[in-house]
Image: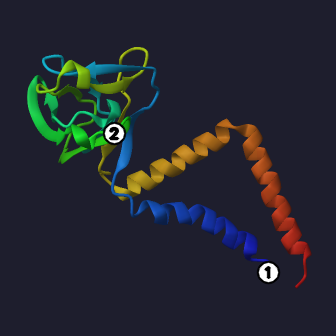
Amino acid sequence: MKYIPVIFLIIILILPAITLLGLRKEIGLNQTTEGEILFFYGVNDYRFTFLSPKENLSSIVLKLKNISIRNSKPVSFSLLENQEVIRQLHINGSNIGDPDMVRFAFAEIKNSKNVKYSVILSSPETEKNEALGIHTNTLNNPVIITYHIPTSRLQLISGVYKNFVDKILADKIFFITWIILFDSIVFIIKSIDI
């Protein structure tokens, strides 16, 4: 019975590491603030640039809108580096919901950390009345999430623990409350003699 607090603490510390071993992708850029919808159709495409925060870029998720799911025309996603297309994907407009987070997955791009990429979304066959939209913030930056393949599991696990400790220490009230509760549980368990 006296080892329960120690076992409890070990579970709290080790369980996240075990869970992270199965992680295949990690989030890089995570910009989810939205305020407007910009539309693209015909010759009016949508272009934006972003800086990849991590290595091994493998997919980009954008919040797109197919109003009333009317559009079933081809949609092109082009990823450019130094004005050169390095990845290009084509989907059908009927694969986009109203709204929907659409993942554009591609072969990983090594050495992508701190590289500036451009994205072009286009649908040349789309008419204005069936235009596709992309959710953006007030500065016209898109709602975007990038996914990256971890370079090292050990690095990923240590990064998660470092982030956890930084966040706990930043919130001193939470930290003190957690320590008091943990000490109380330890005291209660030690005082119960079963």
Asked whether 181 or 100 is in front, the reply is 100
At 84% from the left and 72% from the top, the residue drawn is 189
Position of 67 relative to 91 (above/below): above
Residue 97: which disc? Answer: 2
Q: Which mark is residue 1?
A: 1
Question: How far is the residue under mark 1 from the one under mark 2?
Answer: 54 Å
**Which residue type carries mark 1?**
Met
Q: Residue at x 24, y 21 (%)?
A: 129
Work out which residue is located at the far bottom of the displayed protein and give it: 194
Residue situated furthest left in the rendering: 84
- 193 relative to 82 in the view: left or right: right
Q: Position of residue 136 (x, y in %)?
A: 38, 22
**Quadrant of the rendered structure where residue 37 is?**
top left
18 lies left or right of 83? right
* The C terminus lies in quadrant: bottom right
Query: Is 122 left, or right, of 65 in this rendering?
Result: left
- Dot 1 or dot 2: first in sequence order is 1
Q: Position of residue 50 (x, y in %)?
A: 29, 26
Task: Using the rendered view, name the quadrant where residue 154 is placed.
Answer: bottom left
Amino acid at pointer 2: Gly
* Image height of 78 relative to 149, above or below: above
Give the camera-side residue of 49 and 35: 35
Q: Is residue 11 above or below residue 26?
A: below
